[in-house]
Image (cartoon, grey):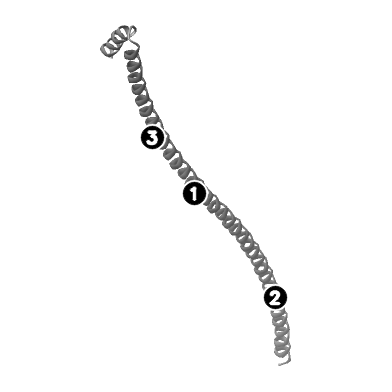
Amino acid sequence: EKTVSSLKEKELLKSQHNPAMMVNLLKTEIVGLVAIKRELDRQISQSKDNDSIEIDQLRLSTLEAKKLASQRQLEIEELKETIRQQGRIKEQLETMMQKNRESQAAEWQQLTTQVKKLELENLGLQKVMDGKDKQINDAG
């Protein structure tokens, strides 16, 4: 680079006295600068294209992530509803079981009472029978 710029400086110094030579040097400089600008523009454009491709990929990834998050949220809501329904069913079953226990206890109590009544009736019958036996034995 130093040799190129020093050569250009030397040519510029020589051309200061020759306007046509100076114009040619400036044209060469301009062509070089235009070429550099085109290359930079191409690189910038390519970089922008790459950036836009990356941005598009990020947008797609974001969309997919949002879609997945929405699906997961729906699944969570469905699970919550299932849990609520199971809770209601459990409560209903517990209520039914409690009523069944109470009903069985009441039936058991009724049966126990009936058995006691039958035992008392039987005891009364036995006393009556014992009384009859005694009367028969006394009479005979």
Please state if 79 lies on the left or on the right of 113 as rendered: left
Question: Mark 3 or 2 closer to N-term?
Answer: 3
Assess disc 3: are there few (<14), some (14-19) or many (≥20) residues with their C-alpha within 10 Å of its C-alpha: few
Question: Mark 2 or 1 closer to N-term?
Answer: 1
**Amino acid on which the number 3 mark rests in the picture:** Gln
| Residue 57 screen position, x and y as percent | 43, 42
Residue for badge 2: 114
Q: Which residue, as the protein is rendered here, is positioned at the far bottom?
A: 140
Tell me the mark number nearer the camera, choosing from 3 and 2: 3
| Residue 25 screen position, x and y as percent | 32, 16
**Amino acid on which the number 1 mark rests in the picture:** Leu
Foreground residue among 57 and 134: 57
Mark 1 secondary-structure assignment: helix
In this rendering, the count of numbered labels is 3
Foreground residue among 88 and 6: 6
**Amino acid on which the number 2 mark rests in the picture:** Gln
Q: Quadrant of residue 47?
A: top left
Q: Which mark is residue 68?
A: 1
Residue for badge 3: 46
| Residue 71 screen position, x and y as percent | 52, 52
